[in-house]
Amino acid sequence: MKSIRFLAAARRELHAEVLFYSEARSGLGVKLTQAVEHALAIAVQFPLAGSPGPAGTRKVMIKGFPLSVVYLPEDAGIVVVAVAHQARHPEYWVSRVGRG
C-alpha cells in the first residue's frame, strides 16, 4: 500500500483551512476533510495524474473548495507539500521542496 506523508507546514495549512470552514458554516469543515481525503486517494493511486508544477510537484484540486493539494510523487507514495488556496500567493511553497 502506498503512503501519504505530509510536510509539517502542509498539515498546519490543512488544519487551518478545516478550522476556517468549520467556523464559517456548520459541517463545512467535515465536507472539506472528506474532499481532501478524496483528492489524496486519487493522488496516491494515480500520482502522475495531477497537473505538473515546479520542482517535480503535482497538483490536484479539492472539489468544492478553492484549494489544491500540492504533492511530490515518490516510489513509496506521495508527500504533500502544501494545501494551497488557488487565488493566493501562487507557488509560495516551492522552497519546501528543496529542489526548486
Image (cartoon, rainbow, N blue to C red):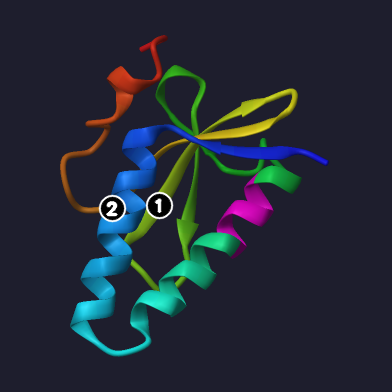
Q: Which mark is residue 68?
A: 1
Left or right: where 66 falls relative to 55: left
- Report x, y in % for residue 72: 54, 28
From this view, report whether residue 3 is shown above or below residue 54: below
Residue drawn at the location 74% of the way across and 23% of the way down: 75
In this rendering, would 89 be left or right of 35?
A: left
* Quadrant, the C terminus: top left
**Helix, strand or loop at mark 1:** strand
Quarter of the rendering containing residue 70: top left
Q: Main secondary structure of the magenta part?
A: helix
The residue lying toward the viewer, choosing from 16 and 62, is 16
Vertical side of 74 occupied by 86: above or below: below
The quarter of the displayed image where residue 4 is located = top right
Looking at the image, residue 50 sits to the left or right of residue 65; the answer is: right
The reply to whether the magenta stretch includes residue 39 is: yes
Q: Amino acid at mark 2?
A: Gln
Give the farthest residue toward the right.
Answer: 1
Residue 20 percent across, percent down from the top left: 21, 69
In front of the other: 51 or 84: 84
- Residue furthest toward the top? 99
Disc 2 target residue = 86
Q: Secondary structure at mark 2?
A: loop
Q: Which residues are magenta?
A: 38-43
